[in-house]
Amino acid sequence: MAELAENPPVTPTSLLSQSWTRLGAGQKMGLGVALAALLALAVGLWLWGSTPEYRVLYSNLSDKDGGAIIDALQQMNVPYKFAEGGGALLVPANQVHEARLHLAGQGLPKGGTVGFELMENQKFGTSEFLEQVNYKRALEGELARSVQTLSAVQAARIHLAIPKPTVFVKEQEPPTASVVLALYPGRVLDPGQVNAVIHLVSSSVPNLTPKNVTVVDQSGTLLSAPQSGENSALDAEQLKYVHQIEEDYGKRIENILIPLVGSANVHAQVTAEVDFTQAEQTAESYKPNQPPNQAAVVSQQTAESSSLNGPGVGGVPGALTNQPPVPAVAPLTAANAVPPQPAPQAPGAAAPGAPPGAAPAAQAAAVATAQNSATNHKETTTNYDVDHTISHTRLPVGVVRHLSVAVILNNHTVTDKAGKISERPFSESEKAQMSTLIKDAVGFDDKRGDALSLLNSPFVEQKDKVVELPLWKQPENISLAKDALKYLIIVGLALYLLLGIVRPAVRNFNQALNPTPVEKALDEFGAEESTGGEDSEEGLEGAGYTDSGAPVAASSYETNLNSARQMAMQEPAIVASVLKDWINGNE
């Protein structure tokens, strides 16, 4: 037998070609799909890693501001996208601050309201009416912006009704304001915050009082509470005050009884009747006069006068009445004569022995003497202070008029000498002591008709029934199952690609690189058949060729069958190994 021809050199390209030719049609298709999937996965990972993180640039933008901002972002070549629902505009995280600064330089976003920047664009020749309208719009916009700074307010609108000023006092009308607030879902404004909004608006407009400001939310609820005294019903503040008093009294009772009976063995409820009547009293009283030596002197006035009375002037007017009277020519009494005791006479009668006309002369002398006498008059006036009291009393508001207290106690546990635990009610003395403690804790007053009810009864233990959903209906289990199913699908696809496509391809490739002894023998046998000489002639004849090398007219099946027979006769061990591999299903 001639020497075997040398085998051609083995290159990676030839190995890949041999491995590809040995694969079946299904394996070739699967390998192509696997390579495409791997390529798509690699591209997706690269795109996912290179995609920037987006963050919110602005949210809750109006349509006008949104369009202007998008145009500005396109001019700046900044990528953007919208959040789910279009409620927010997103840009790459590393460009958020830079984009905000550029947009702020362009005055974006302008917002749904305009402020005093409206006054900056006044045109030449604007009328006074238009200026007033623009000023009111600017003031409304600034107030709306201030109100929107509250954490619970999403949007705000303010309407101002400012009357035109007039010089007539009787025709002046006060300004009014209306505020409409749109609150975030689940947010509310407490009365203090509503009052803050009212005072903010009223303090920003001249002559605007808080009672002329109305605040309404987006659902039409009046948030501005009516002024006190406008209606007789209790307002929210009064109801809150009553509820706070009742809770305070209930906590006092429970805090003083819990150390005695336990935290879960006492319940107390208090009902308070509170008087919110507003009343004022003014009293003015006078006390009886005091003695002069004890009374206080306010003022004292003394008046004194004196006068001298001269003779009266009478007679017939003329020269005769101006002459002095004629002196008397006869003595009125005798010398050294003792006048006799005159007898009582009637007034105007003449004395005995007197000449006729003596009585009228005496009367005239007496009258003249009286007319020439002096008169003195003195008058003193003293004013004493009167004991006068004026008192003005304002009665307190929110006075407790009546209390009704209800307390229920659970039976307390008792352990006997044998260690057995049982429950028994409290004794009457124990309940009386507890009643005294309760009355002292709430300030019980019999005069105002307070009532106390104390009941000792065993409590009924009520366990909350928890409706358990089946495992397959519980939301957390459903979400967990969805996540697990997603990951299982990913793992299944990866295993299919690995075990069904990649692994057979790698194994065939390794077999091409490292042929088995059977394959080596088949190759050597093929090489021997291709050599010249007698062995080659015999091989050709056995394979269906003539001596001249012309093919024998036979079917390919017979040719293959003759080749297999010849190989089985020459190398039975190799043929046995090939059959064994076929039986095991490796080929």
Image (spheres, rainbow, N blue to C red):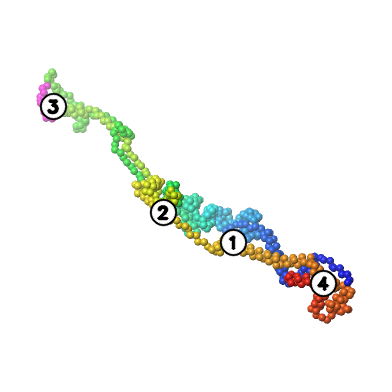
**Callout 1: SS:** helix
Circles 3 and 1 in contact, beta carbons < 8 Å: no
Residue type pointed to by label 4 = Glu
Circles 3 and 2 in contact, beta carbons < 8 Å: no
Residue type pointed to by label 2 = Pro
Is-magenta flag for residue 51?
Answer: no
Relative to 198, 530 lies left or right? right
The answer to whether one can see residue 194 in this image is no
Q: In whole angstroms, how far apart are the C-alphas of marks 4 and 3?
A: 217 Å
Q: In whole angstroms, how far apart are the C-alphas of marks 3 and 2?
A: 130 Å
Residue 371: x and y, percent?
21, 29
Q: Between disc 3 and disc 2, whose residue precedes?
A: 3
Q: Between disc 4 and disc 1, whose residue precedes?
A: 1
**Disc assigned to residue 458:** 2
**Disc assigned to residue 120:** none
Q: In whole angstroms, how far apart are the C-alphas of marks 1 and 2?
A: 46 Å
Q: Residue at x 38, y 52 (%)?
A: 455
Is-magenta flag for residue 341?
Answer: yes
Stretch of the chain drawn in magenta? 339-360
Residue, far front: 418
**Disc assigned to residue 480:** 1
**Disc assigned to residue 358:** 3
Residue type pointed to by label 1 = Leu
Q: Residue at x 82, y 66 (%)?
A: 10
* Marker count (numbered): 4
Q: Between disc 3 and disc 1, whose residue precedes?
A: 3
464 or 71, nearer to the observer: 464
The residue that disc 4 covers is 571
428 or 107, nearer to the observer: 428
